Amino acid sequence: MKAGDNEGAMNFTRLKLAMADELMSLSEKEFSEEMSAEGASPEDAKQTVLSAMRRALYEASRRRATINELHRSSSDGVSDSQIRSLDPERARAALRAAVERCKVADTGFLMAARNEAEVSDDEIRDMLLNLRDLGLLLDQDLE
Amino acid sequence: MIDHRNPEELLRSLGISAPGEIDVVALADVLGVEVRRQPLSGCEARILGTSERAIITVNSRSIPTRQRFSIAHELGHWRWHRGRALMCKPDDMEVGDRRRLSSATSERIADRYAAALLMPEYLVRPILSGLSYIEFSHVYSISQTFDTSFIASAIRLVELNLVPSLLVCHNIMGRKWFVRARDIPERWFPRRELGAESLALDLMHAGTDRRRPELVPAHAWFDRGDAYQYEIMEQSCRLPTGDVLSLLSITDEDMLEDL
């Protein structure tokens, strides 16, 4: 793809977004009238709305993801002192306890990593922080 | 929440119609997954999740292209492996041999998901239609367009079956791995050791770098009696690791017939 193609794709994206915005701003009556005038079937109209909504959701996600990343990069180093101060042995024991409990209690629990080296003590603590942020770490796991 | 069983359907449902619109962090967000970046030493990325939410942590020291693939790979686990704890190496989670094997399969599934998410067939195929063989310039073009690594792009092109082709990686000890397009019958299994008439052998031992694809005898690559009847197209290049990567395209349709 050439640079011009990229520009073309961006323009097309902007056009689609503008169309999505326009569709979302119409009242139900205005929307029905517009779709009828275009000769669209009710099913076409439904798909058009769904597509516009998903597109809007995706674009909102893109903006939110960017904001989240900026926010996190400015708050590096902030951590839960209780977890950060765990000694390595206790941190690993806590992770083991939490994971075993989650595997039994939560049918949707997922943990995956393609480890190429020993997981460091800090990474074990980070995993505990992740579990805490997901609401999966209990006080009893840290005991 | 959007159903993301098929990554290409997910992209289509979001109205993504150009490679530049594939924002993997935004896709994660749509799927209820938060992405965090920080230095990791044990792995490239990991995912921890519960039924509805997950957190992917990706190694911030890796190059952006690798981070992107790793995030997509973890989304593959999110799609396929909820309810499981997968760790590839024996460590604190005490993963045994049987489970390691299962884990390796899970990794391949997640890799395929990532490839389909980052290089969807409906966007790749129109770029490379009508080819009679694949060459590395096509791979490079795809890697640039889709912001993916050279090897991930090469594997994707072969697995998309655009052309009956194989991708084979050798080091000095022999064949390390290969992938094969689905149109190629299983009898065409690449040799473990490089054949004397392969371009790859020249490249491996003499450093002879012939940049263009060339026809070579099929028996240079396949240890079968009937291989002496055919020629195949080969292009080989040396990777920064010292390994030699070979793209083989089958141009003689007789080789594709079932016996």
Image (cartoon, grey):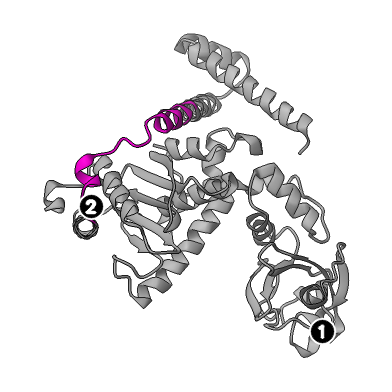
Q: Is residue B229 above or below residue A16?
A: below
Closer to the eye: label 2 or 1: 1
Q: Is residue A68 magenta?
A: yes
Q: Is residue B56 above or below residue A7?
A: below
Amino acid type, residue under disc 1 in the picture: Ala
Q: Which of these two is toward me, A122 or A69?
A: A122
Q: Which of these two is toward me, B55 or B132?
A: B55
Q: Give the x, y percent position of residue A66.
A: 48, 29
Q: Is residue A41 above or below residue B116?
A: above
Q: Give the x, y percent position of residue A56.
A: 50, 25
Residue pointed to by mark 2: A106
Q: Chain of mark 1?
A: B
Residue pointed to by mark 1: B196
Residue A38 in view in this figure = yes
Label for residue B120?
none
**The quadrant where residue A64 appears:** top left
**Judging from the image, what secondary structure is the residue with disc 2 in?**
loop
Q: Give the x, y percent position of residue A81.
A: 22, 40
Residue at screen point 24% across, 59% down: A92
**Judging from the image, what secondary structure is the residue with disc 1 in?**
loop
Residue at screen point 78% across, 36% down: A2
| Quadrant including the N terminus of chain B | top left
Q: Which residues are magenta?
A: A63-87
**The quadrant where residue A3 appears:** top right
Q: Is residue A133 above or below residue B5?
A: above
Marks 2/1 in contact by CB < 8 Å: the verdict is no
Q: Chain of mark 2?
A: A
Q: Residues within 10 Å of mark 2 (few under 14, many from 20)?
A: some
